[in-house]
């Protein structure tokens, strides 16, 4: 399995605090059957504004420590990029990282409450650059929860979507759970990721694949943590 959204790099944002904590999180991930984690520290968010250089340096250090400790996890570069009017410029200047440097996909964060009016314009601009935005945990956004057509329209506009595993099991509340289940049923979900920030909620995916399998069957559920994120890190089309 591949975890496409994880705050694994220590000391950069509100994710893991120390290298030891990051290594412990990786151990849990490996034990759960995850072999690849995309490091996605916050970019342009109130939580943090990490630079590309910080992410790449952090990955280098973590990979070295993983090798020394014989933990079989690969770490790939990324950013959880908060939507803003600077986004395109940021990507153009390699300040906001596309997933695995492929310039094909980015992980896009929306505000928790609302969806900015210019989101469709941003999606269109990204698509013109050959980049597909993957909307991070839309099931947690107030406006997407209440406006039934918004999610469908975002996907129609060309976005992919990533839900957080814990949303499916109710760890993030009943409304979030209900929303995630409906989206999965309607085929509006492309990836399940952990969005793990600490060893208290470490990167695990298997419990959520099991939950998703009850809704869409095993084959489709497995694709959400296997085939689909694999295509994304390789920069392949859907
Ligand atoms: Fe996140």
Image: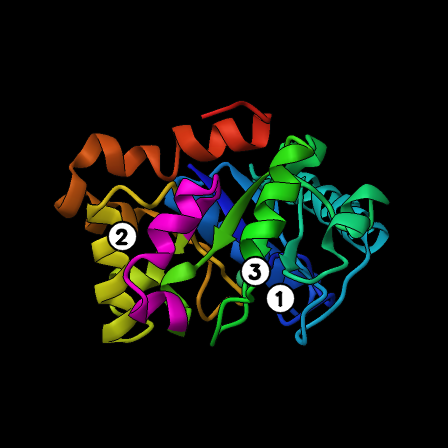
**For the point 82% across and 57% down, which residue is it?**
51
Up-down: is 68 above or below 58?
above
Q: Name the residue under label 3.
A: 109
Q: Is mark 1 on a helix, strand or loop?
A: loop
Q: For the residue carrying disc 1, how many other residues have a C-alpha within 10 Å: few (<14), some (14-19), or many (20+)?
A: many
> In the depicted view, which residue is nearer to us: 228 or 7?
228
Residue 107 visible in the picture? no
Q: Is mark 3 on a helix, strand or loop?
A: strand
Q: Mark 1 points at which residue?
A: 16
Residue 72 quadrant: top right
Q: Is mark 2 on a helix, strand or loop?
A: helix
Is residue 160 found inside the magenta-colored segment of the image?
Answer: yes
Q: Where is residue 59 in the image (x, y as percent from the top left)?
A: 74, 47
Q: For the residue carrying disc 3, how many other residues have a C-alpha within 10 Å: few (<14), some (14-19), or many (20+)?
A: many
> In the depicted view, which residue is nearer to us: 222 or 191?
191
> In the depicted view, which residue is nearer to us: 97 or 159?
159
Mark 3 near ligand 1 (CB under 8 Å)? yes
Q: Position of residue 95 (x, y in %)?
A: 82, 50
Is residue 46 found inside the magenta-colored segment of the image?
Answer: no
The mark that comes first in sequence, 1 or 2, is 1
CA–CA distance in space, label 1 to label 2: 29 Å
Answer whether labels 3 and 2 touch (C-beta < 8 Å).
Answer: no
Q: Where is residue 75 in the image (x, y as percent from the top left)?
A: 63, 41
The mark that comes first in sequence, 1 or 3, is 1
Q: Where is residue 218 in the image (x, y as percent from the top left)?
A: 19, 35
**For the point 56% across and 57% down, which residue is it?**
119
Please give the label number shown on residue 183: 2
| Closer mark to the observer between disc 1 and disc 2 | 2
Query: From the viewer's perspective, is 87 left or right of 8?
Result: right
Residue 38 quadrant: top right
Query: From the viewer's perspective, is 132 left or right of 229?
Result: right
- Residue bounds of the magenta highlight: 143-162
């Amino acid at each position: 399995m591949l975890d496409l959204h994880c705050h694994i790099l220590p000391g950069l944002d509100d994710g893991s605090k120390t290298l030891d904590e990051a290594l412990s999180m990786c151990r849990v991930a490996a034990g759960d059957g995850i072999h690849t984690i995309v490091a996605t520290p916050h970019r342009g968010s109130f939580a943090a504004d990490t630079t590309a250089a910080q992410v790449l340096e952090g990955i280098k250090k973590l990979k070295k420590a993983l090798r020394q400790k014989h933990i079989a996890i690969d770490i790939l570069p990324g950013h959880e990029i908060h939507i803003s009017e600077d986004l395109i410029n940021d990507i153009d200047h390699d300040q906001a990282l596309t997933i695995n440097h492929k310039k094909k996909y980015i992980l896009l964060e929306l505000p928790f409450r609302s969806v900015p009016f210019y989101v469709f314009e941003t999606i269109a601009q990204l698509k013109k650059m050959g980049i597909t935005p993957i909307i991070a945990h839309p099931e947690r956004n107030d406006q997407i929860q209440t406006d039934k057509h918004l999610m469908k329209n975002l996907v129609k506009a060309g976005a992919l979507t990533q839900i957080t595993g814990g949303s499916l099991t109710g760890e993030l509340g009943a409304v979030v759970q209900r929303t995630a289940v409906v989206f999965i049923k309607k085929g509006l979900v492309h990836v399940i990721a952990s969005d793990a920030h600490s060893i208290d909620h470490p990167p695990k995916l298997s419990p959520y694949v099991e939950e998703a399998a009850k809704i869409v069957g095993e084959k489709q559920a497995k694709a959400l943590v296997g085939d689909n994120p694999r295509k994304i890190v390789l920069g392949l089309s859907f």
